[in-house]
Every structure is written in C-alpha cells, then in structure tokens.
Image: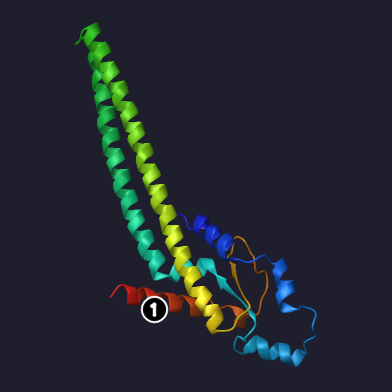
Amino acid sequence: MKKSSLITTIVLAVGLAVLYVLHFTGIGAKTSVAERQELEAGEVVAGSIVYVRIDSLLNTYDFFLDLQSDLSAKARIVEDDLNKKGRAFENDVNNFQEKVQKGLITRSQAETQQNQLAARQQELEQYAQQKQMELTEENQVMLNRVLDALKTFLAEYRIMNNHDIILTTDESSNTIIEATKSLDITKEVVEGLNKEYAKSRK
C-alpha cells in the first residue's frame, strides 16, 4: 500500500492553512539576531508554531506499520486466490478450445460449455471487483484510525505544550519549505504515539 494517499489525507485533515499563521503569530514583530540564534538552538518555546513530518512519522509509527502489514498480508492472500482462480479458468478455456478444434464435442456441447465459461468469467470479474472494494474499504478504515489517533494525540499534545499551531509537512507537499529545526516535533510525537500504542497492546 502506497503511503502517498495516507500522507495526503493526513496533511489535508490535520494541516492548517498557511494564511492563519499571520493571524495567530503576529509576524512582523522584530526579533534580534541573538534571540533568533537562541531559538534556533534551544528548546521549542511555548506559544510557538511547530510542525510534524508526516512521512517520517508514518515510517516509525508502530500502529500504522502494524495495520499496513496486516492489510498487505490480506492483499497478498487475495492476489494469490485470484491468480489461482484465473489460472484454472484459463486452463479450462484452453481445454475447451482444443476440443472444439479437434472436433471432440458436438456443436450443442460447445455452445453449452462456451456459455458456462462466459458465466464463470463474469463471476470471476465480479469476485475480483468485490475483493478490490473490500480492500479499498479496509484501507480507508486504516487511514481513519491512524488519522484519529494522530489528531487525538496532537490535540492533547498542543495543550500540554502550549503551542498555538501544529502544522504538517512531507517531502512531496513541502508545506513547510524552511523552518527552525527546533520546531520539528516529529521525533517527540512518534515516541509519544508509540508509547500509547504499546500500552494499548498490553
């Protein structure tokens, strides 16, 4: 399962519009060079804007990795099953065509078997579509569960650490083009999420 759709979903759902930054931070206030250097190297200050790198978070978030592994296993089972059914159908079609070419069955028998093969093909296509829909639904549920866990954690995290805004970014969207490294809370958030997930598994 690709991570790009998950990343995009979470970025859209959790990320705040950049225009709000101007409203909440009062950008324009002058900061001395010494103050900027202190913030660059120091701890994240209360009342600041911080950000999370979603792609890095997902690569190390145990809950997401476990869900993704389970879904990938289900997808492989479905794929193997479809391949098995597909090969069996293909063999039956080849056998049917060989009998027709050799004149081993009557015209009436050929018509009956052809109709049966056509019905089987339709059933196989419907089965494949059904499994695809089931996997798509399970994937969406997985995204919702990860998003809900992340939003719940960040809502409490923001209050506990007195942050104004928590933004999200990733390599593809570049929501945050340039920022002070001390404002990157990805590692801290992942550690907190993994601790909560570990507790829930006990």
Q: Position of 141 compared to 70: left or right? A: right
| Of the pair 42 and 88, the residue shown nearer to us | 42
Residue 81 in the image: state x and y as whole percent.
27, 42
| Image quarter of residue 1 | bottom left
Q: Position of 118 compared to 153: left or right? A: left
Q: Secondary structure at mark 1?
A: helix
Residue 92 in the image: state x and y as whole percent.
24, 25
Q: Is residue 102 above or below residue 21?
A: above
What residue do we see at 42% from left, 48% from top?
136
What residue do we see at 78% from left, 90% from top?
32
The residue at which mark 1 appears reads as 195
| Image quarter of residue 191 | bottom left
| Image quarter of residue 165 | bottom right
Residue 187 seen in the figure: no
Residue 125 in the image: state x and y as whole percent.
36, 32
Q: Is residue 86 above or below residue 74?
A: above
How many residues crowd mark 1 within 10 Å: few (<14), some (14–19), many (20+)? few
What residue do we see at 29% from left, 48% from top?
77
Q: Position of 113 compared to 140: left or right? A: left
Residue 196 in the image: state x and y as whole percent.
39, 76
Amino acid at the residue labelled 1: Lys
| Of the pair 185 and 200, the residue shown nearer to us | 200
| Of the pair 63 and 145, the residue shown nearer to us | 145
Q: Is residue 29 above or below residue 152?
A: below
Q: Quadrant of the C terminus?
A: bottom left
How is the structure coloured here? rainbow
Q: Total label count?
A: 1
The extreme left residue here reads 104
